[in-house]
Image: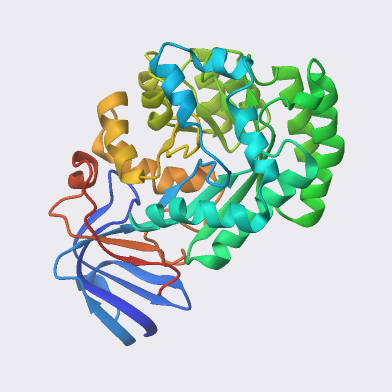
Amino acid sequence: MRCDHVWSDARLATMVGEGLGSVEGGVVAARDGRILYAGPAAEAPRFEAAAETRCDGRWITPGLIDCHTHLVHAGDRAHEFALRLDGASYEEIARAGGGIVSTMRATRAASEDDLVASALPRLDALIAEGVTTVEIKSGYGLECAAELRMLRAARRLGEERPVRIATTFLGAHALPPEFADDADGYIATVCDEMLPAVATAGLADAVDAFCEGIGFTPAQTARVFEAAAAHGLPVKLHAEQLSNLHGAALAARHEALSADHLEYCDAAGVAAMAQAGTVATLLPGAFYFVRETKLPPIDLLRAAGVPIALATDCNPGTSPLSSLLLVLNMGATLFRLTVEECLLGVTRHAARALGLQREIGTLAAGKACDLAIWDVERPAELVYRMGFNPLHARVWRGM
């Protein structure tokens, strides 16, 4: 069988079936950027390959997926970090004009080129750890022109680097100052002006919102979701990070791809997510950084069979983190996830959280040939170690 490239003498974590789908003595073959075969060498067809790479027993996983980031923004919020060290809460800082609105001011003042240039080092850090797909949200412009500029910058990152970028419109992230005390008026602008412009330009793959006391109410969020559906866009939701507004159940009613954070999610929300097939995306970097103490309902999610994804939540205010490998360790140490749960959370389940499960996330015939090749003795090392990057090679679309 003709193919472009074969990776032989490898051990595979295919993420297919039970556990990690481990294969000893494995081989991966690709043609035209897609996997032809991934499995035991003893069962593989005979390949006529233009190129072959011997992996010398190294492990191959699917390319890692960071399914929740705010990678594109201007400025930083280190001063707010200092305030939190002195005892100020996330809500107090936000209500005093800091938080998301602080980043909004810097982002509105930045050009598209500025946004691309500032995001590239964060993206490069992820790529260096074997990440091949990154979701990037808008939400720091909070006006039509700036939101469009953020999304264009995000798409450009996928032209600057060999990486798949999934873009998410997050206009309902916070209330901008010009709409002070008029959240309904701002939501109307999001639904009637911003979202149509984003959809017409083809700049978003999904729509998100922040359903929270310092964000938007469930009723306002539902308006955004209804507008997204009218434009044929799937939805995601920042839900139950700081309180329980039953956002997870709301997300499930709208067949959301994922509900993210979920520290305050209750049993009813978990049951609704399980029924709808909505992924729980957990963000241990934000949990750590804001010193949260209430854990997401891990046992409830497991019992209900809700897929669990993990992501960096890379953002300037509550998770200035650009290491998905560190997220693996945080998921295990802070949330008590297993090695299997952590690794599935940045591959198969992360792909599902983006609606891309047919394209990426597992080593299977027909999927994009996005691979991470690791100098480790066992996959558990990827979760166990901190400050350690054992990536040997990264393959994106077979290259």
Q: Residue at x 60, y 34 (%)?
A: 103
Q: Quadrant of residue 112?
A: bottom right
Q: Residue at x 82, y 48 (%)?
A: 197
Image location (x, y in percent) of residue 159: 57, 67
Asked whether 73 or 388 is in front, the reply is: 73
88 lies above or below 99: above
The quarter of the image holding the N terminus is: bottom left
Image location (x, y in percent) of residue 266: 50, 13
* Residue 245 horizontal side relative to residue 227, left or right: left
289 lies above or below 53: above
Image location (x, y in percent) of residue 61: 30, 57
Asked whether 72 or 202 is in front, the reply is: 72
Q: Residue at x 49, y 56 (%)?
A: 120
Image location (x, y in percent) of residue 118: 53, 52
* Residue 80 horizontal side relative to residue 221, left or right: left
Q: Is residue 362 visible?
A: no
41 lies above or below 207: below
* Residue 370 horizontal side relative to residue 165, left or right: left
